[in-house]
Structures are given as structure tokens and as C-alpha cells.
Image (tube, rainbow, N blue to C red):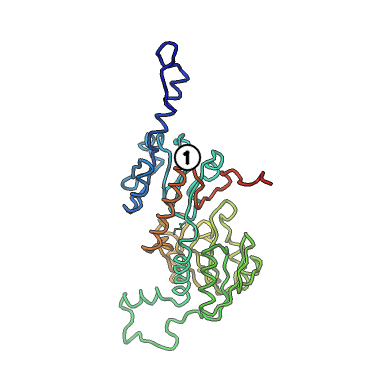
Amino acid sequence: MAARPSKDNGFLGSGTLVLLALEIDAKMLKQVLITQPLPNAHLNELAGHCEFSVLSGRQSLASASMRDELAGCHGLICLLTDAVDHSVLDAMPKLQFVSSVSVGVDHIDVGVLTERGIPLGHTPGVLAATTADAAFGLLLAAARRLVEGDRFIKDGNWRLDNPWSPDFFLGKEVSGATLGIIGLGATGQAMARRGAGFDMSVISWTPSEREMPGVESVSIDDLLLRSDFVSVHLALTSTTYDFINADKIATMKPGAVLVNTARGGIVNELALAQALNSGHLYAAGLDVFESEPVAIDNPLLQHPRVVVAPHIGSATTVTRAKMVELAVRNAVAGLGGRRMPHCANPEVYPLTGKHEL
Ligand code: DGY
């Protein structure tokens, strides 16, 4: 509705001024902040819906210089390296949505968003197969000592006076072993399929009690007791923090291998290092750490049979493009006030059909 001068005196009344202000506001494009450059094709799609600015470099959202930018921001597209905590959210009074280019949302204060009724988009599903590939790669590399072998050759140690022999670089048999999967979401299920393809017996424990054909559901205690390989696929929350603690590690099958491509905070790193050093566990394959980038003096890095990667579980060109595409779809829905295709806090949306007969 267009605002008109008041009929009485030709001046705009205060009610009319409010209407005018609302109308101007409605016509102004919403401001979206993107914390890292994204491929142009996806930015073009966003451009029709909002004005956006992209942070250059590695600027932290918490820095004082960001305050003005945050204050005018209606939407935020961020990565798992951006801490979107209470204080950052407090600095964003106009915020209407957050879209993270990640499946995990532990870097964001989801509770605050939900309290404020702000939807949080994330990218489940599209990275499951790629992350399971990385997890299985770590499992194989740790079991078969592939990284140790690589280092051995490149350090010039494979010589005629240090030759091949029948017990040279013996590793752990994968085929026929038991693979225990903790967390049976899309990535856990993809890992289960890979294990089955390698003739492993696959067992699982998951907080959601989800089941999968061909995978035996067991208690967490049974899983730790029976598994030759344990692969972690949980989301990090206040309940899963330190879930694989010293007590649980102590109950793992002697000689087992632990693989973690989920979040570092789920596994107690000190307890894991101690179990490896004491020989209780055989090896570990880790793509994630409690604090990233992992400190060079982290005790896990000292063990020869710990194979590590810098949080690259989903790092393929194809998968990253799918993640960005989904994050942009979530953002466009957020801008239009529509339900996001993948919302991590769907309780912000009113229940549809609840009162229908
Ligand atoms: C995520 O999206 O949460 C993954 O950790 C990225 O690999």
C-alpha cells in the first residue's frame, strides 16, 4: 500500500510515517554476509535475492571491526571454521537466517537461534559418500600402515641392507574383521556399505535407534568390545562431547583401530594417545581434532600408527560444490521467509497441519 499525505493538513501523520518507513524497508534488499568467497555461479543465484558482502581473508566474526557489518546483517552464510556464538549473534539484531556450508553445526549457538526463531540451514546427505570414502581410506591406511610405508621409502630407509622380508610392515587384516559404526546417519550408513563391500561384519550403535539391513544393532558396550575397527559418525553436541572417553576406550577390543571423521571433541584425545602408546589400541585414523588446526605437539601426532588428515572428509570438488549449492538454496529460502530445504532447527517453523482435521 502506498503512503499518502494525510487529507487533513497535507502533512504526513506519524502512523503514515511508520507505514512509509516499513515500505522503504520492504523495498530495500536484505543484507547477507558471506564469510568466505564462494564460486561465482552460486553467488549469481544469490544476487537476485539480496545484497551480499564477502569477507576477505580470515576475518573473525567476533572481531570489533565486524560490529557495523553484523548490525545491518539479515542473513549469514558461514563455514564450520566460523564461531557463531552468543556474542556474535547478539551483535546481529536484524538476523533472519543462518546458512552453514557444513552438515555439522557445533560451531553455531543453535540454542540462541532457536530461541529467536531464526532458522539454521545446513548440508546433510550430499557429503555422506565422500566422507565415508575418507573414513574408509583412513581405516585402510591405518590398518595396512600405508603412511608409515610411504615415509619409510621417502626417508631413504628401504635399502638392500633393510630389505623386504616376510614380516616386513605387517598390518591388520581388514577383510573378515568386525566394523563397529557409532552413529548411523547418512555417513554412518555409507561407511557400513563400504565395510560390507570389504567383507567385514558390520555392527552399529546409534542414539537414534535407526536400523539398517545387514547391520547388526548392538549396545555401545558390545560394539566397543567386539569391533576390530570402530568408526565414529556422530554429530558433536553437549551429549556427545567426550563420548569416547577413557572408560570407553578401556573397554575397546585390544588391538582395535579407531577412525574419526566426525568431530574431534567426541573422542578424548589424551585417552586415545595413552591407549595407543600402551599398545591397547593398534592404530587410529583421524580427520578431525578437538582444536583445529591441530597443535603440532598434540601427543597423537607422535604415534607412528596414527594416520591424520586436516579435516578433509568432504573435500572433493564435486561434493564441495553440492554443499555450497545446498547452502545457497537454504539461504534463498531464508531470504524469502520460506522453509529451508535442510534446517538444523526445524522447531522454528510452525507445525503444519497440526490443527487440521
Ligand atoms: C561438515 O560439513 O560438517 C564436515 O565436517 C565438513 O567436512
Query: Is 135 on the left or on the right of 357, as rendered?
Result: left
Q: Secondary structure at mark 1?
A: loop
Q: Is residue 171 above or below residue 33?
A: below
Quarter of the N terminus within the rendering: top left
Task: State the residue at coordinates (64%, 65%).
Answer: 220
Q: Is residue 243 above or below residue 4?
A: below
Task: State the residue at coordinates (40%, 13%).
Answer: 10
In x, y percent, where is residue 69?
A: 37, 37
Picture quadrant of ligand 1: bottom left
Task: State the residue at coordinates (43%, 47%).
Answer: 332
Residue furthest to the top: 9
Query: Is 164 on the left or on the right of 106, as rendered?
Result: left
Q: Is residue 271 above or below residue 357?
A: below
Residue 117 falls in image quadrant: top right
Residue picked out by circle 1? 96
In x, y percent, where is residue 135?
A: 47, 68
In x, y percent, where is residue 174?
A: 51, 79
In x, y percent, where is residue 229?
A: 54, 72
What's the residue type where badge 1 is placed?
Gln
Q: Residues within 10 Å of mark 1 (few under 14, many from 20)?
A: many
Please tell me which residue lies in front, 295 or 337.
Answer: 337
Q: How many marks?
A: 1
Task: State the residue at coordinates (49%, 54%).
Answer: 104
Please tell me which residue lies in front, 301 or 18.
Answer: 18
